[in-house]
Image (spheres, coloured by chain):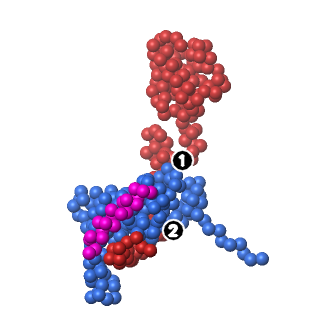
Chain colours: A red, B blue
Amino acid sequence: MSELPGDLERALGKLDARAAGRAARVDPERVAARVLERLRSERAPSRWLAFPLRLAIPAVPRWAEVAAAAALVVVAGGIAAGVLRGGGGSLAVPVVAQSLDSLSRQQLETVLSVAAEVRPVVSDTVRLTGGVWEELSEEQLRAVLQAVQQVEVGGGTL
Amino acid sequence: MGAPATAVVTDGDLIARYLSGDELAAAELVRRHTAALARFLAVQGAPDDDLEDLVQDAFFKAFRGLGSFKGGARFRTWLLAIGGNVLKDRRRQWRKREVVELMPDVPDTSRDPAGEAEAGWTARKLEEEIGRLPRLQREVFLLRAQQGLDYGEIAAGLGVSEGSARVHFHHAVKRLKESVR
């Protein structure tokens, strides 16, 4: 039994028939093609490299992004090591740590490796030897790096 | 030995396939639900010129948000709710531009113009009144009376309780009944 009063049911039936006629003009194949196209184009930008070169470089495979990010961290670490060895010790870790939140776990580990290598005091006090930070969570790695940063900036000890 | 029966691929299967990268699954979902979605939007007064675009927008948003689709409601109910939001947003834009034609003058194709004139006029009045209903009343009413969904499904799709869905339906019917007298 219908829940609608007769008048309302008839009017809705008429209105719905018109709506169905208009809906029939919408082409599902065309809709599907356009929706997929929009989804693809939306996905594409996220696969671009996350630095200024992205304007010139189209979508690249994931492995290339990871390699580029790793190379960036290693280069930054090398520069940091050079600065530290040259006596500008308070600059290196803060420079790297400015973008702490954007670093992946792997990148955090790499930065800590570099810090431990160029600053023996770091590895002596926090015991940052290989394998130790594999047991730490990403948050803990960030906290360690922040602590190292504070020590470097403040000139204190851990 | 007979051929095995054709397996029915559910919406849930297609969603899982799409989420693992199968675009053909998404296209199949669009094929399945375009007519219902377009009808749902058309009966609320979506203009013909914008209907396909609105349908496209709703599907796009649905696919983009599939990660948050919990499966408490059917995909179609969830999609129609998204369609309702897309239409609401679009109306807001139209109002800003002041070029709104909420009730397009659709030619009546009935074979008996004299006999159907009054029914056509009543249907148009009803369309206007549906457009004026509060959003939840309108959507509950259409999901129930046009799409034939049960209250449990409507409640899950719109994120309200079943009792609340019944109350919205009751209020909508009461108000619409006046408009067709």
Q: Which residue is mark 2?
A: B32
Q: Which mark is residue B119?
A: none
Give the CA distance from mark 2 to mark 1. 34 Å
Q: Position of residue B91 (x, y in %)?
A: 29, 60
- Main SS of the magenta part reads helix
Above or below, comparing residue A70 to residue B43 in the picture = above
Q: Nearer the viewer, residue A72 or B167?
A: B167
Assess disc 2: are there few (<14), some (14-19) or many (≥20) residues with their C-alpha within 10 Å of its C-alpha. Answer: some
* B154 sits left or right of A65 in the view: left
- Tell me, yes or no, whether the highlighted magenta stretch contains residue B166: yes
Q: Residue at x 57, y 39 (%)?
A: A66
Q: Nearer the viewer, residue A121 or B88?
A: B88
Q: Residue at x 23, y 64 (%)?
A: B99
Q: Which residue is mark 1?
A: A60
* B25 sits left or right of A4 in the view: right
Q: Which residues are magenta?
A: B162-181
